Amino acid sequence: MLATVTTAALLGIDAYTVGLEVDFSRQGLPTFTMVGLAEGAVRESKERVLAALKNNGFKLPPARITVNLAPADIRKEGSAYDLPLAVGLLVGAGVLEAGSAQGYFMAGELSLTGDLKPVTGILPLAIRARQEGARGLLVPLGNAQEAAVVEGLAVYGLSGVGQAVRFLSGEEALSPVAAEGVEGSAEPGEFWLDFAEVKGQEHAKRAIEIAAAGGHNLLFMGPPGSGKTMLARRIPTVLPPLCFDEALEVTKVYSVAGQLPPGRSLITVRPFRSPHHTISDAGLIGGGSHPRPGEVSMAHRGVLFLDELPEFKKSALEVLRQPLEEGWARIARASISLSYPADFMLVAAMNPCPCGYYGDPHHVCACDVNQVRRYRARISGPLLDRIDLQVEVPAVPYKDLKAPHGQLGSADMRRRVLAAREIQNARFAALPLRTNADLSGRHLNNFCKLTEAEHAFLENVVKSLGLSARAYTRVLRIARTVADLEGAPDVSVEHLAEAVNYRNLDRRDEAG
């Protein structure tokens, strides 16, 4: 007898439909064969499933069993095929009626006792099931809330294979799981951190406000203890809240990576990722023998903070260039090519020199000129060009340290950021753009129109600082954001001057 059960497999962060076909034949010696490019965990599912069925009182007749995972030309991996395989075997053996599983998508890992364990990537599978018009989705109880986030799909949480059989045979009625814990956006008062706790550094806070308002990348440079990390960790408190579609995108990445927080069915706060500088290329960009999203994708729609930027491996930093330009991390292998979303705000921090005190009026720098140059040369020019704002963060003077709190708090900064984002939303409503950081080509010219006075100012800046074409574009984008924060319809010389002021490394190179 031939039985077909529907499940899904992951390709990047999306799922595609897989038909699990089970054929029982009484001809020949009893064997069990699985085909369809099944990887190790999938091949091992035979032993788990057979033991689970036996321990739950289900007996399979001796037969020549062939299992096919279609499409057979794409690799299948993971333990989520246990439940559909068990159901397929029971339908093929006649324990379940032939049409009992028709129209249902299912996934889950079985223990030897028949209990269902949660698996990764359930959210993309649920989205695929809804797209296919499935009658319902059968998943482990631990995945039910995650899958229930998808509206228009009946999700049934199961404790084990026995309950799955009773449900499919009509012996036990189950109600679809309702999504719980889908919390609203976190408001500034709900954050543990606040910019009011940062004393001094008003210039850096202004740069953060501009970066958050326009979606720009940001680099802090200053001596140890000046507050670079403290500033970076508070940036999510001034970013706009995630809309539902963005939250769904972020949750899909975390679901595929198996890092969805316990008890959370939807991530509603923008991610903040801070990998250590010893991270590998694959850990940063994604990939590996079994490809998984990297830190750039885990920071999707949020902040990727790279502390001690020059200490990262040069090869790891260079792989950032494509995601920063395209918003996608593309991984090519001999057998497969994957794309993971990686639309993030890059925030980096570095010391001005190896000892950290170059240019500090209160400490003596122990580095010579060549050491400083070699240290900064670890960050390539093309990567620096992709960082819009380059800001100096000096040591905090004592008069600021003794103040009870900083002048600017997250709530005030966020209000201005949201107002600027509203202007951009209206401006880009009919365009495939989200923020000023996405402006390029004719759109940049249309929305950053300059008079002769502004052109003359920029021409002088480009000549004196030796700005590249990409750096020139960055200046225009920042100036557009500065104008939006002020509610100004056009970019002025004052806006351009402030934007140039945030190309700190260009000015240092010229001075040096």
Image (spheres, rainbow, N blue to C red):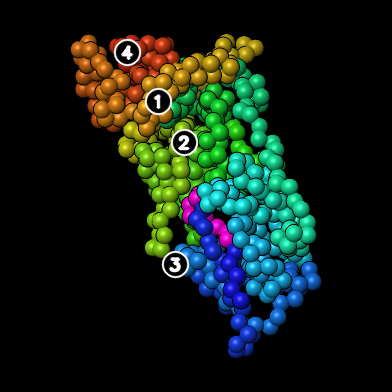
At a point 52% along the width and 35% down the height, the residue shown is: 246
Amino acid residing under circle 2? Phe
Q: Is residue 453 above or below residue 444?
A: above
What type is the residue that disc 3 sits on? Asp
Return the x and y of residue 125 as percentages of the image width and height: 57, 52
Identify the residue under disc 4. Answer: 490
Quadrant assignment, res 33 = bottom right
Is residue 392 visible from the viewing direction of this image?
no
Mark 4 or 1 closer to N-term? 1
**The quadrant where residue 191 appears:** top right
In the image, what residue type sits under mark 1? Ala
> Mark 2: which secondary structure?
loop
Mark 3, residue position: 73
Residue 294 lies in the magenta stretch: no
Q: Earlier in the sequence, mark 3 or mark 2?
A: 3
Return the residue at label 2.
344
Q: In the rendered view, would you say 59 is above or below 453?
A: below
Task: Give the number of the mark in front: 4 or 1.
Answer: 1
Pick the quarter of the image with the N terminus.
bottom right
Which of the marked residues, 3 or 4, is nearer the chain's N terminus? Answer: 3
| Disc 4 packing (10 Å; few <14; some 14–19; many ≥20) | some
Q: Marks 4 and 2: which is nearer the front?
A: 4
- Give the number of the disc on residue 429: 1
